[in-house]
Image: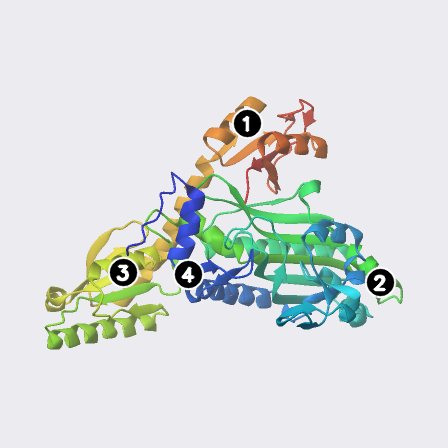
Amino acid sequence: MSNKLPKRSEDFSLWYNELVKNAQLADNSGVRGCMVIKPYGFAIWELMKEQLDKMFKETGHQNAYFPIFVPKSLFEAEEKNAEGFAKECAVVTHYRLKTDPEDSSKLIVDPDAKLEEELIVRPTSEAIIWSTYKGWVQSYRDLPLLINQWANVVRWEMRTRLFLRTTEFLWQEGHTAHATKQEAIAEARQMHDVYETFTQDWMAMPVIKGYKSDSERFAGADDTFTIEALMQDGKALQAGTSHFLGQNFAKAFDVEFQTAEGKKEYVWGTSWGVSTRLIGGLIMTHSDDEGLVLPPKLAPYQVVIIPFLNKKKAEQNEMLIAKANEIRDELVQFGIRVQVDTDITKRPGFKFAEYELKGYPVRMVIGPRDLENDQVEIARRDTKEKSLQNIDGIGTHVNDLLNEIQDSLFNKAVSFRDTHTTEVTTFEEFKDILDTKGGFISAHWDGTEETEELIKDATKATIRCIPLDAKEVAGVCVFSGKPSKRRVLFAKAY
């Protein structure tokens, strides 16, 4: 294709933005800060959604849908949550427009159509869902309540970037209610595990599991569990969170249940979610200067078959197309998603560049000589390796190759993550690694929000998580010099 991408090493941000657009994933819209997800990008999201939805249902959850509008009085009922999102809210104040009396071609807000109570366009749905749960939960027999919804949310952003941070985005949000604290914590941890499994097994994106510091915790939660991934530019990406809400929302919305012993108690809650920013993570974890590199499990098409067609040889073309379709049919039997490109108006070189840009994991080419020798040329997108393969047994070979590519991408990303995780003991080391190498920095921290904020002000690095497997090892805080119980992970982040 003629669209050549900037180099990652020279301008990672520009490379990312141009790749998203040139690969036909998404585009900016006529609404400031919002994006249009194009069919190819939405196909990736649909594959993500399909697998996640299956995993949610396998763990006992059901899908539902709740309104996009939240009355302000409900939104402010849980004070910490309301305060945490207040600066990002879009607010509906009127319900009607009318013709401008001074210019009949224009519309104005009808001042007589002011709402009695403002409506918040949901930045998250705890308020509307927990106000609903009040009517759904009376007895211990109604618990646990395990609900997920696929929806859009709005968070008013000043600086946006396609998929990573937009004013409106797509996501799923789970909201559950339980009879005991132990059950709710187990639920939050279970969904934390589900997210880890999905990102690593399907996205081939390694993550570190941990929990957030108090200042980074979700507003209204007692604990926030997170999975943190590392992008190729050395910045971290929060890929998914699962929150143990305690009884905070139950008390705010008076969600009580009668126990088996006849006592009244507040339920215990969780919420958890991932969004379309996972597509951004997928891009930044694997892709290169030529375009997308997609793990086979999430590639809309896993294989493209390109017969070498000649406008002057119709009979030969028919034979090549027939063989390509025959191979496609065999691959489909293995559950492989295949596209056959028979467009005779485009040159093979153009097609190669196009499918490389779009990240098709395997490209298969068949020409007249291949037809004679009963073989095809196979090219891997991840390593650019090419090989000749006999058509006999092609389905088994390609299926094994796709699994190999999936594993290879994950192992490559793990290697990058591990070589970009650095232990430091001094703040000078901390700053030097941040400036020269990037990545995760493992450092002792004294546990105070004051120190956390001072480090952030000085370096723009934040505590990404306190790893779940972090061992208690006595040390000295990298910034304050005060005693520290364990190391935590810092990084600059999206």
Q: Residues within 10 Å of mark 2 (few under 14, many from 20)?
A: some
Residue 384 vertical position relative to residue 260 in the rendered view, above or below: above
Between the C-alphas of marks 1 and 3, the distance is: 44 Å
Front label number (1 vs 4): 1
Q: Position of residue 333 (x, y in %)?
A: 33, 73
Name the residue rendered at 82%, 70% in the picture: 139
Q: Residues within 10 Å of mark 4 (few under 14, many from 20)?
A: many
- Residue 363 disc label: 3
| Residue corresponding to mark 2 | 254
Q: Amino acid at mark 2?
A: Asp
Front label number (2 vs 4): 2
Q: Amino acid at mark 4?
A: Lys
- In the rendered structure, the answer to whether residue 91 lies left or right of residue 294 reads right
Q: Position of residue 421 (x, y in %)?
A: 49, 35
Q: Mark 2 or mark 3: name the one nearer the start of the chain.
A: 2
Q: Mark 3 or mark 4: name the one nearer the start of the chain.
A: 4
Quadrant of residue 456 within the rendered picture: top right
Q: Amino acid at mark 1?
A: Phe
Discs 2, 4 touching: Cβ within 8 Å = no
Name the residue rendered at 47%, 65% in the picture: 42
Q: Amino acid at mark 3?
A: Arg
Between the C-alphas of marks 2 and 3, the distance is: 58 Å
| Residue corresponding to mark 1 | 430
Discs 1, 2 touching: Cβ within 8 Å = no
Q: Mark 1 or mark 3: name the one nearer the start of the chain.
A: 3
Residue 410 visible somewhere in the drawing: no
- Residue 171 disc label: none
Between the C-alphas of marks 3 and 4, the distance is: 16 Å
Q: Secondary structure at mark 1?
A: helix
Q: Mark 2 or mark 4: name the one nearer the start of the chain.
A: 2
Picture quarter with the N terminus: bottom left
